[in-house]
Image: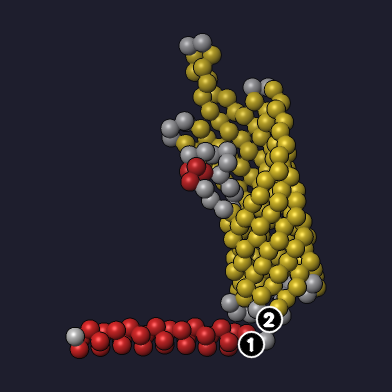
Amino acid sequence: MRNILLTKMKKTIIILFALFFTGFTILRAQQEEKPHLKLVGFGLHIEQFKLNDLTDLTSAPVNKLIVTINPTQKFRIEPEFGFKFGTNDKTKLKSSTINFGIGAFRQIQRNKLNIYGGLRFEYGLMSIEHNSYNGMTQIKETDKLNRRMFGPALGGEYFLGNNFSIGGEINILYVTINNKIDGYDDKSNYTSTNSGLFLRFYF
């Protein structure tokens, strides 16, 4: 019985110490001065990843390199570039994707938290190589796809130091896709949502 009580007391002390340390860390972070936004930063835009992306090459997101430019403390421009190459062993599909994008945002800083909102535009080119049959003959064909996405974005980043931040972003996007398959053009339009994780390092 005594051992049980001692064990519970130890656990209680550990929990109280953890809570105290967490509270002290948060309070100290709030009291620290907000970092001055640097003019240029580089980072990664890691898009949401779904289980079906492992087998569906056409829907898998493209992670991108970003350049964050802050001409002022209240305005940001962010070009981005990404590429992806993949092969599906089951369907024998081979794909290559190149993405270009740019965003323009108004931003507000509260201590170590930076909140921004604005617009993003993205243009993507995808090439899909696959095997098809013409009668008894197997031939290789290549389908071309281009995608345009445009819409509002809202995001935030938290500075873990003066030069490094981690954050997230959500988008509502109007998407236009133009497929060129077997010499025929197939166009489609729809509205979608997107989210991503951002890692930035400022110089």
Mark 1 is surrounded, within 10 Å at the Cα level, by few (under 14), some (14 to 19) or many (20 or more) other residues, namely few
Q: In front: 169, or 85?
A: 169
Query: Where is residue 145, by image quadrant?
Result: top right
Residue linked to disc 2: 111
Q: Look at the numbered discs 1 and 2 and tell me whether their residues touch, using CB distance below 8 Å.
A: yes
Mark 2 is surrounded, within 10 Å at the Cα level, by few (under 14), some (14 to 19) or many (20 or more) other residues, namely some
| Mark number displayed over residue 32 | 1
Counting from the top left corner in percent of width and height, residue 174 is at 74, 45
Q: In front: 152, or 79?
A: 152
- First along the sequence among labels 1 and 2: 1
Q: Give the Cα distance between marks 1 and 2.
A: 7 Å
| Mark number displayed over residue 113 | none
Q: Is residue 92 left or right of residue 168?
A: left
Query: Where is residue 161, by image quadrant?
Result: bottom right
Q: In front: 174, or 94?
A: 174
Counting from the top left corner in percent of width and height, residue 137 is at 49, 14
